[in-house]
Image: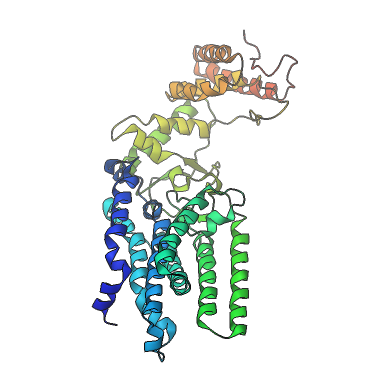
Amino acid sequence: MKFRALLRRSAATWTAPIWCGIVAFYFFYALHLEDSYEEVVAGPLWGAQQVDIALTYFYAFAYAITLGLATWDGGRLKRDRVWDMAPSRARWTVAGQVLAPAVAAGWAILLLPVVMRLIETGLVPTFAALLPVFMGMGIVGAYAVVGCVLGHMAPRVIAAPVATVAAYYAISKTSAYSDPVWPRHVSGQLSTSIAFGEYYSAPTVLVPFLFAAAIALAIAVWWSSPRLPLRLVAAVAALAAVFLSARTASGWGVVDGPVSAGHAPVRCIGAAPRVCMAETGGAVDRLGDVRSEITGSVEKLRAAGVSVAVPSTVSDGLLYQRTRTRPHSTGATWWLPLTPQAEAAGPAGRLTGVRLAVLLNSVSFPCAFPAKNTPGASFDWIVNHDAAMLWAAHTVDVQDPYLRGRVGEYGHFANGAEILAKVRERAAKGLALPTAAQRAAWFEEEQAKACRLARKQPSKGGAEARAEGTTS
């Protein structure tokens, strides 16, 4: 069949205004419902993340429309008795030619929003960033096979619209599954979002493709081959692949399929500490200012008598946004929210957030403190701990943001207002001492008091926070 005749007769051609309209509507309306164009291009920009966002609404549409079109065109093959007119040609050769426009339509539904999003953001994707596109294109082919067989087995006037609606509903509703969790991971509609600096790991995109391809292959063999042994082998292989896919996906979290993090390019300056920020995070132009704030804060804390070890590297926490993939800060390497804080400050604003992050990572205590949900733990240490931290916060001029972050914790106690007042009072006493040596000695003593209180058992009166030596 000639190409022009194939396009003219294919359902994909005369339904193109419908599915092109769907792509246009969801791209220009749904994808920008919450984020304006200015917010989208402001960053942080990461190719794989933008590809993932662009595909969010289109997986189910692509698969469902491909299934419906393939069902219609498969039914036309049966109606036109193509097999009788060309018995010498392989059945799947003819079917592949006829189904090509349906497959192309499904691919277009996936590719158009991705291309438009990448043009919008000015990004050039890597191969790894396009893995979900390749997965979707493979699954589109599987749905085309299933549709072709369905069109031969049922009246296409009924089967095509019913199959389209049923497939769309079944695929889109998998996002509501949490027990069992595997349907949402094998449906071909990826429920795991990509954060900055991440790629999908191979299992995340291979499992749904294997699930769909195994089913499609078994259906194709049963329809095209009269040999029972071959049919049984195909059925057993498909069941094994489906079981393996479901079993693999059942071990993943609800929205936590395997991802690989830390791939975004960085720009670094200086030494001891070497400060690195994400190149495409949107704030790398303030890298020099960020390093100056870090080194200046460390110097002020050390001058005030706080023992601070200078790290060899300070890295951008934006590179590892997801908690389960984020490295922990160590004495040699700090992971701080450099880009978010620099963005929040604006092109020429004060980098208060960077100084606060330095404070929280550099000031350490000679003991560990219980978490707020630790049963039977004493919380009398909070006043002394926070007074010492507030004193240090004054040193780098972040006392107000530090207290704003702590006020929420005080709300867990019945005497929260009293705790806040005591923290302010004790920190003021430390700041009012006449010499730097006295202030440093007060800070160390306050740390020691906090540790002594943390080791005590709570009193019978409850877990209200108290200060040791309030009048001292």
Quarter of the picture holding the C terminus: top right
The vertical placement of 394 against 421, above or below, is below
The residue nearer to you, when weighing 272 against 374, is 374
The vertical placement of 361 against 255, above or below, is above
For residue 128, say whether it is visible.
no
The vertical placement of 294 against 237, above or below, is above
Q: Position of residue 356 (x, y in %)?
A: 45, 30
The vertical placement of 77 against 62, above or below, is below
For residue 79, say whether it is visible.
yes
Residue furthest out toward the left: 4
How is the structure coloured here? rainbow
- Give the image quarter of residue 145: bottom left
Q: Position of residue 284 (x, y in %)?
A: 33, 44
Residue ID at (39%, 33%): 293
Residue ID at (58%, 77%): 234
Q: Is residue 390 left or right of 367 when viewed as pictured?
A: left
Q: Position of residue 217 (x, y in %)?
A: 52, 74
Quarter of the picture holding the N terminus: bottom left
The residue nearer to you, when weighing 202 against 228, is 228
Q: Is residue 289 left or right of 449 when viewed as pictured?
A: left
Residue ID at (42%, 34%): 354
